[in-house]
Image: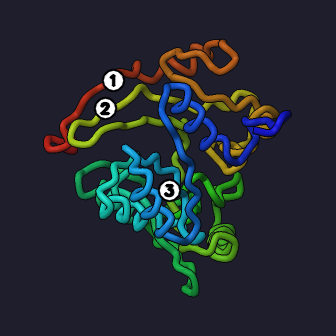
Amino acid sequence: MPEGTDVVTAPWRTEYDVISTLRALGHEVRPLGVHDDLGDIRRMSAEWKPHIAFNLLEAFDEVTIFDQNVVSHLELLKLSYTGCNPRGLLLARDKSLAKKLLSYHRIQVPEFEVFRSGRPVRRPRRLEFPLIVKSLTQEASIGISQASVVDTDEKLRERVAFIHESIGTAAIAEQYIEGRELYVGVLGNQVLQAFPVWELFFTNMPPDARRIATDRVKWSVKYQRKYGIESGGRDGTPRRDGRSHPAHLQADVPRARTERVRTDRLTAR
């Protein structure tokens, strides 16, 4: 790594963390950048015969939804890999499809409507303001800002047009529900392990700003430092600076606990 490089602000910091951690644990690691050639994966698999591929792919040939096809290729090569399987990626990529599946299992989700490019933006009566407008298939808060929350039909049309033109995908408008940003990591195959809940804290945000994980909240270190945006365990796990989060931010959410769940016994309640 070049001297003076700030890993925290580097676009490849995730890759650096994974590689450096695996090497520190004594594993041999070979990074492989894949753009638009599946042959690179096949050749590496045949020549080096890795035990496992750490899949950090975000797009193939600059198409985000093609990541599921690359994972399918790993399965055809019978190469073990980390992360979600192709079917899971397919379901998760389409926010409307994921919400329909959850709804079928009686899990409550916000009301929503999909607006595809080239079609009129007509809000159904069941969809009440305020709404938050997102890309239907993009992740990582791409295209999400404070302006994503709209409260009039005119602003809804403007934001949907923004998604169509700048992101190039269909847009989804969901009922906006004021709340907190909570995250739960899940690891496993037939037996799943749910990890303690992690929270995103907005310490110094302006009073009139929405507490939502926008693109800048997630990826701009300068923005994070300016507004005191930190993450940590909502059961009292210290922040990066070693301090605990304010007690009033922890008191109204039950303490996290780790659970193991058999996937063949999952039920919706």
Which quadrant is the C terminus positioned in?
A: top left
Q: Is residue 129 visible?
A: no
In the rendered image, the residue lying farthest to the bottom is 118
Task: Indicate which disc, 3 or 1, sits on the residue closer to the N terminus.
Answer: 3
The foreground one among 90 and 136 is 90
Q: Residue at x 57, y 24 (%)?
A: 232
Q: Are marks 2 and 3 in contact (CB under 8 Å)?
A: no
Q: Residue at x 67, y 32 (%)?
A: 202
Task: Give how far apart the Cα atoms at labels 3 and 1 are.
Answer: 30 Å
Of badges 3 and 1, nearer the viewer stands 1
Residue 185 picture quarter: top left
Q: Residue at x 53, y 67 (%)?
A: 60
Give the image location of residue 222, x and y in percent.
81, 38
Q: Are marks 2 and 1 in contact (CB under 8 Å)?
A: yes
Q: Secondary structure at mark 3?
A: strand
**Residue linked to disc 3:** 175
Which quadrant is the N terminus positioned in?
A: top right
